[in-house]
Image (cartoon, rainbow, N blue to C red):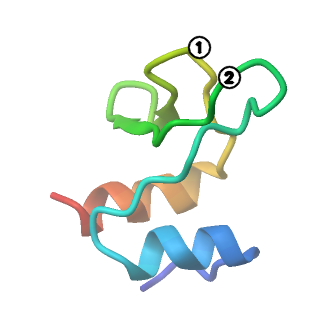
Amino acid sequence: MAYKPQTWMQEKILSEKGYVPYCGNGKYCDMPRTYFDPRRMQFVCPHCGWVSKFPEECMREYAELNK
């Protein structure tokens, strides 16, 4: 792992293959699991369209680990 995780969530997505977080828009959504959008290189909520804001380096590492 080249990227050093800065938060527990970054550690989680980089240590569990296939892990996707819940939607982060809790106020306006029922918080389902997101999906990884390789075009945006972020996680996206299938219900409300919320998009995560993980660092680019972290998401590149995630994409590489989950090929």
Task: Using the image, determine if residue 63 lies above or below residue 61.
Answer: above
What residue sits right under mark 2 in the picture?
29
The disc label shown at residue 62, or none: none
Residue at 65% over, 68% down: 9
Contact between labelled residues 2 and 1, with CB atoms less than 8 Å apart: yes
For marks 1 and 2, give the one nearer the viewer.
Answer: 2
Q: Secondary structure at mark 1?
A: loop
Q: Amino acid at mark 2?
A: Cys
Residue 64 on image: x %, y %:
27, 62
Closer to the chain start, of discs 1 and 2, is 2
Q: Is residue 12 left or right of residue 10?
A: left
Left or right of 4, for residue 61: left
- The image quarter containing residue 30 is top right
The percent position of residue 12, horizontal first and vertical second, equals 53, 75
Q: Residue at x 74, y 29 (%)?
A: 25
Q: Which residue is mark 1?
A: 48
Residue situated in front as seen by the camera: 33 or 16: 33
Looking at the image, the residue that sits furthest to the left is 67
Label 1 sits on what residue type? Cys
Calculate the distance from the C-alpha at mark 1 to the C-alpha at mark 2.
6 Å
Relative horizontal placement of residue 39, taking residue 8 as reference (left or right): left
If the image is split into quadrants, where does the N terminus sit?
A: bottom left
Q: Residue furthest front?
A: 30
